[in-house]
Amino acid sequence: MSYVLKWNGRDLPDELKELPPGRYIIESVDRAPQLTDEQEDDLIAAIGEADAGQSVTLDEARRRIGLVLERRQSGSFPEPSLSSRPGSNRFA
């Protein structure tokens, strides 16, 4: 699970205080690359699909992506279109 938080550089954010003990990676997103309009639309559509229960488990997503990568490496599969629209099954 990911958490996005704002930090003033001094005080420990409440979001971190609520996490269970363990090791965490913290990365600044202030310098994240700018999304294109198409990438942002695709991301919004994907979030909408997930919110509507139209998503797959992480294991299933990894399996499907693995199949695409295997096919691409073998040359038997064209470059996939990553555009997402509600109800699409991008990696089936």
Image (cartoon, grey):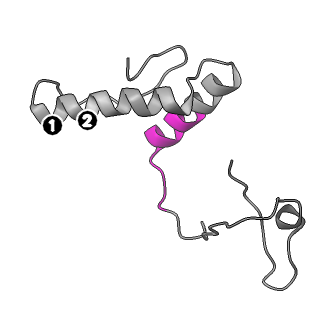
Q: Is residue 15 above or below residue 82?
A: below
Q: Is residue 35 above or below residue 54?
A: below
Query: On the rendered image, what quadrant is the C terminus found in?
Result: top left
Magenta stretch: helix, strand or loop mostly: helix
What residue sits right under mark 2 in the picture?
69
Element on which disc 2 rests: helix
Check residue 41 for magenta coloring. Answer: yes
Q: Secondary structure at mark 1?
A: helix
- The picture quadrant where one finds residue 28 is bottom right
User: Badge 1 local density, few (<14 within 10 Å), some, or many (20+)?
Assistant: few
* Residue type indicated by callout 1: Gln
Q: Position of residue 83 (x, y in %)?
A: 40, 29
Marks 2 and 1 in Cβ contact (< 8 Å): yes
Task: Residue under label 1, please give it.
Answer: 73
Q: Residue sitting at 44 percent across and 47 percent down?
A: 36
Which residue is found at the position 70% from the left and 26% from the top?
51
Where are the magenta residues, as a range?
Answer: 33-44
